[in-house]
Image: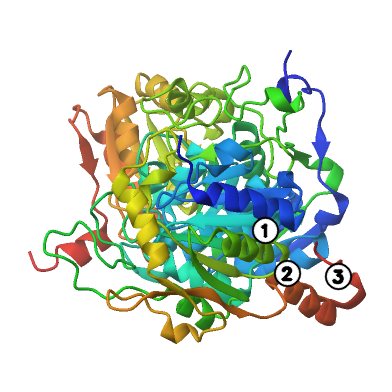
Amino acid sequence: MKIHPLFSTFANAVKKAEIESDKICLVSDFLYQPKISEYLGFDLFHVTRGRSIPFATGMKLGNPKLKVVVFVGDLITLGGNHFMHASRRNMDIVVICVNNFLYPKINGKKSPTIKSAFSPYSVFERPVNIPHVARSSRAVYVARWTALHKKELTESMTRALGKSGFSVIEVISPGNCYFAGIPASPKENELIEFYHKNSEIKNDEDTKNVEITAEKKIIVGKFFEKKRPTYIDSYNERHSKVIGDKFKIYE
Amino acid sequence: MAFGIEAEKEVIMKANKKDVLTGSYYIDGDVAAAYGAIAAGCKFVGGYPITPSTEAFEAFVHRAPYVGGITIQMEDELGSIASILGAVWSGKKAMTITSGPGFSLMMENIGLGAMLETPFVLLNVQRSGPSTGLPTQAGQADMMQSRWGANGDYEIIAISPDSPQEMFDYTIKAFNLSEKYRCPVMIMADECVGHMTEKVVVPEADKINIEPRRFYKGPKEKYLPFKPDKDLVPPMAKAGDGYKLHISGLTHDEKGYPTFSQTPDTKRLVDKIRLNADKIIELNEDEIDDADVVVVSYGITSRVAIRGIEQARAKGLKVGNLRLVTVWPFPEKRIAELSKKVKAFVVPEINYGQIVYEVERCAHGNANVVLVPHGGGFVHNPEDIFKAIKYAAQEKKKVEGIIEHKTELYRLIHEKNS
């Protein structure tokens, strides 16, 4: 049985970050449906397409003790707006964006991050540079790895899980082999290795230079990290200033 | 062994003293709804301001920090409803507030809420439509959308208050119903009720009954998120408590795992409301027993109708008043029962015919059904309702289908060129 490398990297990261697994909530939508939680036993919420980030926002505000992780596919399509706003507010959630260049469940459809796909006349649209969108909407942690950069990816996930704030990790990976029961076709294995071979690690690279194009190598690395008060921090600070003693810190 | 509500039937919870601002106030319906939500224990509102519902959101935002609540102005209505679903699953009581176009944006997640059996309340202060419509003016044209808006089969509960006092009372009721049946409950108010300023009496906390969330009490490893109790409603667990929840918007089985065919759980989404309809439905009836004509109305129109009914009674007509407090589920049995006794139903509503179709369906051709349509913007002239009653009382033959009783305003607007 072949299991997607993301399974082990995420499991290892949770272990390394020393987070109680009960407190981890995965939120995903139809663009990417993580089987991870079915094998590892985290709480999973599988919501409407593109709305996983606002759902996660509500969860985090409902119970700030939760560690909410959003597993999504090409999230810039449906709900790109939510991504920018959650980032701007610095909602304390980790977004793991599994970019597979095509919708895994709706094979052959174009997606905005696409490089090449089953489009009969090939694709002429430019992809979205996800790390740059994250960076410009002020996410506190931005990284990109391919699924085979297991060591680095685990490290990034551990870092993001341990941090408070809106963290974005883009994972370049083909989509279909996440169905653990179904053997991945040789093509997908080739593809996942192709991505790995065609990548170049450039930590702290300016995100405007990391656009994925057919001509250049895929630039991976940890691009940005900073500390910034989260939405709940700012909420508490503002309200205790205005209301004073009557305000009870929300936590 | 029974868990959840069956096991603790005797427990009657009262509102939290901190959450209830006991006293009498002179406030508008929107604010009253926000106070009602807080009294009911609502701790989270995710919303996006839209006239004429903004005051409710504002009032909640103002009070929330004092009662341990939190609010967020989301980027849009798609986000606001998704956020309240999330908050409910992490253990809060939550509400969202909107109007017309925002309500349209919320549809897909209302479906998700129904599918995940998430208890939440949606306050829709209706304005005139379609689309942007008349942003600051009244309408009642979202009634069918509230029931059928999202894709697939599901049932919701809708309540239509007609005064600021009712906005307070029925918001509490809406929360109680949503917790009891684990379904979306909509408060279908309208601009008139939302912006109407009247006296609102907030009772003492121990006079307000609160339906607690039906949390699962049994052993963790045996928990099945969609295994229902006897009344078809499953007990709930919240995220982060180690239940290993698998909650999916895909058609699922009792475990919450996706299935590739319809399951009994899908049918249960409609059954839990339809089979419990008699317990949910609330009607106000007045002089209905010997009536020839019954006026069926809801929301602000039911208050306008009173004047028309009084005029008709003064002329010696036997008119009953049937006010729908809960519009969905629809009181099918009661309308069918009445249709055998009365000559006609008169249905005034601020739209070109929505609830009138339900009345016609349930009348089974036994009585005439007269619609008094109104395009929105403001309320009916009571005179028009009186005229419709007079016509309905005099009409001797059975007329097939809905009889449209055109008001003078209607003729003025729509027929001036013909």
The type of residue carrying mark 3 is Phe
Please state which of residues B363 and A155 is positioned toward the viewer in this rendering: A155
Residue B196 visible from this viewpoint? no
Disc 1 to disc 2, how far (Cα)?
Answer: 9 Å
Quarter of the image that includes the C terminus of chain B? bottom left
The type of residue carrying mark 1 is Lys
Q: Determine which of the numbered discs, if any, sits on residue A232 in the image.
A: 2
Please state which of residues B256 and B345 is positioned toward the viewer in this rendering: B256
- Category of crowding for the residue at label 3, using alpha-carbon neighbours closer than 10 angstroms: few (below 14), some (14–19), many (at least 20): some
Q: Residue B2: where, in percent of width, then height? A: 72, 16
Q: Which residue is mark 3?
A: A247
Which numbered disc flags the more N-terminal residue, 1 or 3? 1
Location of residue A168 (image quadrant): bottom right
In contact (CB < 8 Å): disc 1 and disc 3: no
The chain to which mark 1 is attached is: A
Nearer to us: label 1 or label 3: 1
Seen as rendered, the residue at the extreme front is A197
The way the protein has been coloured in the rendering is: rainbow
Seen as rendered, the residue at the extreme top is B1
Which numbered disc flags the more N-terminal residue, 2 or 3? 2
Q: State the SS at label 1.
A: helix
Q: Which residue is mark 1?
A: A60
Q: Residue B169: where, in percent of width, then height? A: 67, 47
